[in-house]
């Protein structure tokens, strides 16, 4: 009896292990975490997609957890060439996620866990090459915002083929060859110097125009004053001439008045004479009026 007990204990242990294996193999309860989808396969074939939460499946079905969270792909030094054959490089960060209605397609064709970073890398480099080839090097610099929009649009369309939806595209660097960048910097420097020279010339021209305007205004003021003085003198002379004409006309028409004035003057002189003759009379000097009646 005692010898049989160890055998029974071993049998119980073996039976327990078999039960555990059976339960583990036939366990019908599964969980799909948040931010994921459950891909259900039956003997390797996709038979359904489960949302987040508890999933109950029969033993012949298998559940694979598939991420639809945002993923990130860093593309370093993607190379391209402009329409005028200038090499250019760019580094980008692409954030994307798997479209929920494309989970089965992506699981079947591209990835069993939702990681499409390798496809995103390839698609981004191809897109960058295609877009930069449309622009010349100067246009790439001058129209960088438009170039970025073109890359964004083209990459969204390309990644949609793989079932991915683009969340954002960040362009971290954008550079030409060192020799071309040096040429651009030199051109920018020369352009700035040209603008400075033009602005200086415009300033000098403006100052000269201002001086000319001031001189013309001063000359106009002098001319205006001279014209005013001449006009005033002319009016005065005209008035004096008119007065003389009036007086001459009056005297011509009234000679008796003139004679009367002369007599009045002589009478005034006679009335004021004291009767004393001058001691010396120069030749041609007038002889005072003498009253012989006294």
Image (cartoon, grey):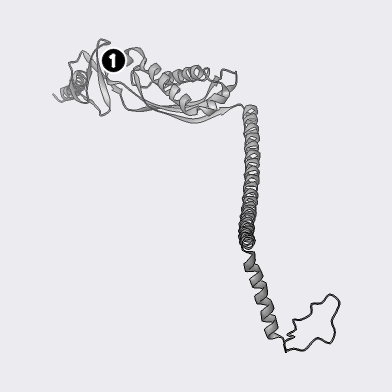
Q: In this orientation, which residue lies closer to the viewer: 51 or 43?
A: 51
> Which residue appears farthest toward the left when viewing the image?
1
Say how many tags the image has.
1
Quadrant of the rendered structure where residue 182 is?
top right
Q: The N terminus appears in which quarter of the rendering? A: top left
Q: Position of residue 290 (x, y in %)?
A: 75, 84
Q: Position of residue 177 (x, y in %)?
A: 61, 26
Above or below, 227 against 113 in this view is: below
User: Considering the numbered disc 1 on the image, is that residue within a helix, a strand or a loop?
Assistant: helix
Q: Position of residue 114 (x, y in %)?
A: 34, 21
Instruction: Tell me the residue at 84%/87% (across/down).
Output: 279
Q: Residues within 10 Å of mark 1 (few under 14, many from 20)?
A: many
Instruction: Tell me the residue at 50%/27% (across/down).
Output: 143
Q: In this orientation, which residue lies closer to the viewer: 172 or 114?
A: 172
Above or below, 287 against 48 in this view is: below
Q: In this orientation, which residue lies closer to the viewer: 291 or 284?
A: 291
Residue linked to disc 1: 104
Q: Position of residue 2 (x, y in %)?
A: 15, 26
> Which residue appears farthest toward the front when viewing the image?
293
In this rendering, would 223 be left or right of 286?
A: left
Above or below, 29 against 264 in this view is: above
Q: The C terminus appears in which quarter of the rendering? A: bottom right
Quadrant of the rendered structure where residue 163 is?
top left
In this rendering, would 272 be left or right of 111?
A: right
């Amino acid at each position: 009896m005692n010898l049989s007990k160890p055998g029974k204990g071993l049998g119980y242990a073996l039976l327990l292990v078999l039960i555990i294996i059976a339960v583990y193999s036939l366990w019908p309860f599964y969980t799909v975490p948040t931010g994921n989808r459950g891909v259900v396969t039956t003997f390797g074939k996709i038979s359904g997609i489960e949302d987040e939460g508890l999933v109950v499946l029969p033993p012949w079905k298998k559940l694979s957890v598939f991420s639809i969270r945002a993923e990130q792909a860093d593309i370093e030094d993607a190379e391209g060439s402009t329409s005028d054959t200038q090499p250019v490089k760019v580094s980008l960060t692409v954030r994307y996620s798997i479209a929920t209605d494309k989970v089965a397609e992506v699981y079947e064709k591209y990835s069993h866990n939702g990681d499409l970073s390798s496809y995103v890398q390839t698609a981004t480099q191809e897109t960058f090459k295609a877009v930069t080839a449309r622009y010349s090097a100067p246009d790439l610099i001058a129209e960088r915002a438009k170039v970025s929009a073109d890359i964004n649009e083209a990459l969204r369309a390309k990644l949609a083929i793989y079932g991915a939806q683009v969340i954002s595209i960040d362009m971290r660097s954008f550079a030409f060859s060192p020799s071309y960048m040096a040429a651009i910097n030199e051109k920018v420097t020369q352009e700035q110097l040209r603008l400075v020279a033009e602005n200086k010339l415009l300033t000098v021209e403006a100052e000269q125009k201002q001086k000319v305007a001031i001189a013309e205004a001063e000359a106009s003021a002098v001319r205006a004053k001279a014209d005013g003085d001449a006009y005033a003198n002319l009016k005065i002379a005209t008035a004096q001439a008119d007065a003389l004409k009036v007086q001459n006309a009056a005297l011509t028409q009234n000679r008796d008045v003139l004679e009367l004035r002369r007599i009045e003057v002589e009478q005034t002189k006679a009335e004021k004479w004291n009767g004393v003759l001058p001691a010396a009379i120069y030749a041609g000097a007038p002889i005072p009026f003498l009253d012989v009646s006294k």
